[in-house]
């Protein structure tokens, strides 16, 4: 009816109150699915339990190191008596890799799983969050003697991290070998075959490269010589620089000539060994040159007056002693002292040579790998090498140099604590005996 008023009562009368009582395919399927799905889930869980398959209980993918344990949850999750859940226990971790604690005087030892969180995907467990480190180092406390380390560190950065200990005020290079880096980096440096241009890697090389260098006679430029050494086997990777040695890196320019009668150099060894070498060489020489035992005597005449003929006749022992003394005078007072700190004996005996005391590793509490930085020019980080004239100069890059690449942000290199520091000293790892079986891990199935 046109114009009729549509009241709420009239609209309610149009609703079919028996709608839900009539059968409908959708409601029928919904009922059976709500019953069947839980039943199937329970049956599946029961079947996995009877078969020993624990993958269904995993909270996420395991790291690559533990991926093989995905079917063996109880290898890590040891259930304690009276506890409902089985948490990952330190006992389970230590059964495979028993690493020592950080420091003997630490007051807090975190649980393994609190720093190394599993079920986060195929990640490296060593990539711990900074919070794992700062839970102690933000307010560092130790037992016993006071700590020598900085007590408040929040993160990496000049504002939240101190300057490296080797570069703090008052630190000097303890080495006694006299080396002027600025002179060695000059262009047109005098070499054995003419002007040369030195570069950092002529002397500083990784242990695995293990190369010495010499100067090419045609071009006058430094060329490398491949050598085999146990050092390249004992030290893995290209993390640190191999020690600079005279035989590999210095002898090409700095020879130890001691007498014009010989083309060979004296050995780079202790004064006792050098003296024995000199005595032997001159004894062998005079045996075939006995005419040199007759030497002109010292000229004591006045100027412009004829010199009388004066000849000294020496015994072999006298001749050898004088020649050895002259060679030692040249070596001790000039050649060797160019690089070494010598203390000459007051009675004319052999000098004392100070220990070289070259630092093999400047940052013992941090890890650094030169291979990962080999795309950079050496002087980008070690810029002080171009201007350093003093042996006491420490030519390491400071923290501000590292911050140019290592800082927060998606476009930066990793800057979390684990990148340079480790908690465990794995060189002191305790021996463990494996107990797992391949069949129990599900391997080969």
Image (cartoon, helix red, strand yellow):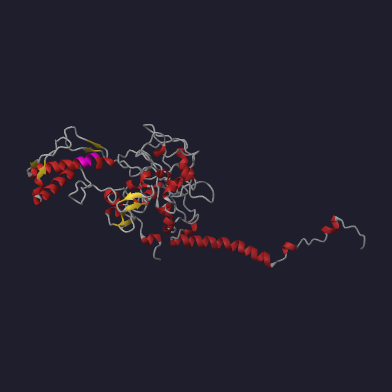
In-image side of 60 versus 315 (left or right): right
Camera-side residue of 335 and 398: 335
- For the point 9% across and 42% down, which residue is it? 311
Q: Determine if residue 103 is in view.
A: yes
**Image quarter hosting the N terminus:** bottom right
Q: Is the magenta stretch mostly helix, strand or loop?
A: helix
Percent coordinates x, y for residue 330 in the rendering: 21, 41
Question: How many numbered badges does the structure rendering display?
Answer: 0
The verdict on residue 386 being magenta is no
Camera-side residue of 188 and 277: 188
Percent coordinates x, y for residue 306 in the rendering: 13, 39
The verdict on residue 330 being magenta is yes
374 is higher (above) or lower (below) than 321: below
**Image quarter hosting the C terminus:** bottom left
Q: Determine if residue 81 is in view.
A: no
Percent coordinates x, y for residue 370 in the rendering: 40, 51
- For the point 33% across and 38% down, which residue is it? 174
Camera-side residue of 294 and 215: 294
The magenta stretch is: 329-333
Percent coordinates x, y for residue 298 in the rendering: 13, 38
Camera-side residue of 59 and 102: 102
In-image side of 199 versus 155 (left or right): left
1 is higher (above) or lower (below) than 327: below
């Amino acid at each position: 009816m046109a114009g009729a008023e549509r009241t709420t009562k009239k609209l309610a009368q149009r609703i079919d109150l028996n709608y839900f009582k009539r059968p409908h395919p959708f409601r029928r399927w919904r009922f059976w699915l709500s019953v069947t799905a839980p039943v199937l889930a329970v049956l599946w869980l029961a079947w996995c339990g009877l078969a020993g398959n624990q993958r269904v209980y995993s909270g996420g993918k395991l790291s690559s190191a533990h991926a093989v344990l995905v079917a063996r949850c109880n290898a890590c999750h040891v259930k304690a008596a009276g506890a409902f859940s089985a948490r990952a226990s330190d006992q389970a971790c230590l059964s495979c890799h028993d690493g020592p604690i950080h420091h003997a005087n630490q007051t807090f030892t975190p649980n393994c799983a609190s720093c190394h969180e599993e079920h986060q995907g195929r990640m490296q467990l060593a990539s711990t969050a900074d919070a794992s480190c700062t839970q102690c180092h933000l307010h560092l406390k130790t037992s016993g003697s006071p700590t020598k380390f900085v007590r408040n560190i929040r993160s990496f950065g000049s504002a939240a991290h101190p300057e490296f200990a080797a570069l703090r005020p008052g630190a000097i290079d303890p080495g006694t070998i006299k080396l002027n880096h600025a002179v060695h980096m000059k262009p047109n440096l005098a070499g054995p075959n003419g002007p040369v241009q030195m570069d950092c890697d002529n002397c500083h090389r990784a242990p695995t490269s293990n190369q010495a260098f010499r100067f090419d006679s045609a071009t006058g430029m430094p060329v490398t010589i491949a050598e085999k050494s146990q050092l390249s086997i004992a030290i893995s990777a290209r993390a640190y620089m191999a020690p600079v040695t005279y035989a590999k890196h210095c002898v090409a320019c700095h020879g130890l000539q001691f007498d014009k009668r010989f083309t060979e150099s004296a050995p780079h060894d202790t004064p006792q060994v050098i003296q024995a070498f000199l005595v032997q060489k001159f004894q062998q020489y005079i045996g075939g040159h006995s005419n040199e035992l007759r030497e002109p005597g010292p000229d004591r005449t006045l100027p412009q007056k004829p010199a009388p003929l004066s000849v000294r006749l020496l015994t072999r022992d006298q001749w050898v002693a004088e020649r050895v003394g002259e060679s030692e005078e040249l070596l001790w007072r000039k050649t060797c002292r160019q690089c070494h700190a010598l203390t000459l004996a007051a009675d004319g005996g052999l000098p004392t040579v100070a220990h070289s005391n070259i630092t093999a590793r400047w940052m013992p509490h941090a890890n650094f790998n030169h291979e990962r930085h080999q795309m950079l020019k050496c002087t980008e980080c070690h810029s002080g090498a171009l201007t350093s004239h003093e042996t006491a100069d420490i030519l390491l890059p400071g923290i501000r140099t590292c911050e140019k690449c290592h800082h927060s942000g998606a476009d930066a290199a990793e800057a979390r604590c684990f990148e340079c520091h480790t908690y465990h000293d794995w060189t002191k790892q305790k021996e463990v005996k494996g107990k797992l079986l391949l069949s129990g891990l599900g391997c080969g199935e």
